[in-house]
Amino acid sequence: MLNDRKKNLLLYHFIVFLYGFTSILGELISLQALPIVIYRMLIGALGLAILLLVINPTHFRVNKKFLKKVFFSGIIIGAHWMTFFYAIKISTISITLSMMSAGALITALIDPIYNRKKISHYEIFFGCITIIGVIIIYRAELQHLIGITIALFSAFLSSLFTILNRTLVRENNFMTLSFYELLIGGVVCLIFYLITNGYKPSDFELKGNDLLWILILGFICTTYAFNVSIKVLRYLSSFTVMMIINLEPIYGIILSILIWKDEAFLSLNFYIGFFIVLSSIYLNSIYNKRRVEKSLK
């Protein structure tokens, strides 16, 4: 069990690195937030459909009870990505990612309510430390108040999705779950777009390198990354998952430095915040490891 947990911890760190790259792609793609999400979810669903056809076509068969549950989670992940990319468009990558650090604390508060258990004081503690670390790095400014608010709501949706999926993945094949969540989420987002905007082909028109970035976002950062991120929920707690997601801002900013050569981010605040975030994640891992070891004795 410990070996499975270690493997999935390392795997999820890589997945979060890919998620850090999605913020860069969101900035590079010329489209607005909702068309980006529609492309992402439907291309991601297509990739999983191909995998399911190759591996085992029977995994497409699901009952009505499953569809009712996955319908809600599909809407939530679609709304999360839409608010995430929208916050990036109206503010900055750094501000949006910094607000996502609130996900661990939000999870520590709502997970006990959903699963009817006591609120863990250590989760609240580590969640608060992580928020402090990321805020030190980015120092969000008041002129981006709307972007900050939307990003915080996106963090809430991400936390809610993780908690719901941890229950669903125990009862269902993770690839089937991923496929239907992406398909349902993509279709719902498309319907929402058509109702609120009508059909405007120009909104979905790909320019320059948009096609390349969309395909990377759809197949690599969604078909692969999203699918694996659900699989690891069999071995990691919702809070641990959200704690590791706090590294997404770090990965995102490092990638932006490499791509845009923006060395201004490498300030003393960056290193202090980076150390605080890493420390909280490391201490959380040690604490959880000891809890698992004690439970096995």
Image: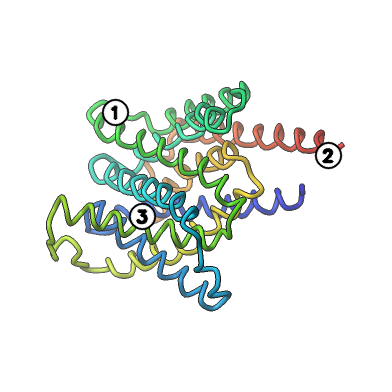
Judged from this view, the residue extending furthest toward the bottom is: 54
Type of residue at label 1?
Answer: Glu
Instruction: Pick the quarter of the image with the C terminus.
Output: top right
First-in-chain label (2 vs 3)? 3
Q: Earlier in the sequence, mark 3 or mark 1?
A: 1
Real-space Cα separation, disc 1 to disc 2, in angstroms: 47 Å
Q: Nearer the viewer, residue 20 or 137?
A: 20
Q: Give the numbered dot on residue 296.
A: 2
* Disc 3 residue crowd, few under 14, some 14–19, many 20+, Cα 10 Å: many
Q: Residues within 10 Å of mark 1 (few under 14, many from 20)?
A: few
The three-letter amino acid code for the residue at tag 3 is: Gly
Q: CA distance from mark 2 to mark 3?
A: 39 Å
Q: Are marks 3 and 1 in contact (CB under 8 Å)?
A: no
Quote the CA–CA distance across marks 3 and 1: 32 Å
The answer to whether the residues at label 2 and label 3 have Cβ atoms under 8 Å apart is no
Mark 2: few/some/many CA within 10 Å (<14, 14-19, 20+): few
Q: Foreground: 130 or 52?
A: 52
Q: Amino acid type of disc 2?
A: Leu
- Residue for badge 1: 141
Residue on which disc 3 sits: 185
Judged from this view, the residue extending furthest toward the right is: 297
Q: Secondary structure at mark 3?
A: helix
Q: Nearer the viewer, mark 2 or mark 3?
A: 3
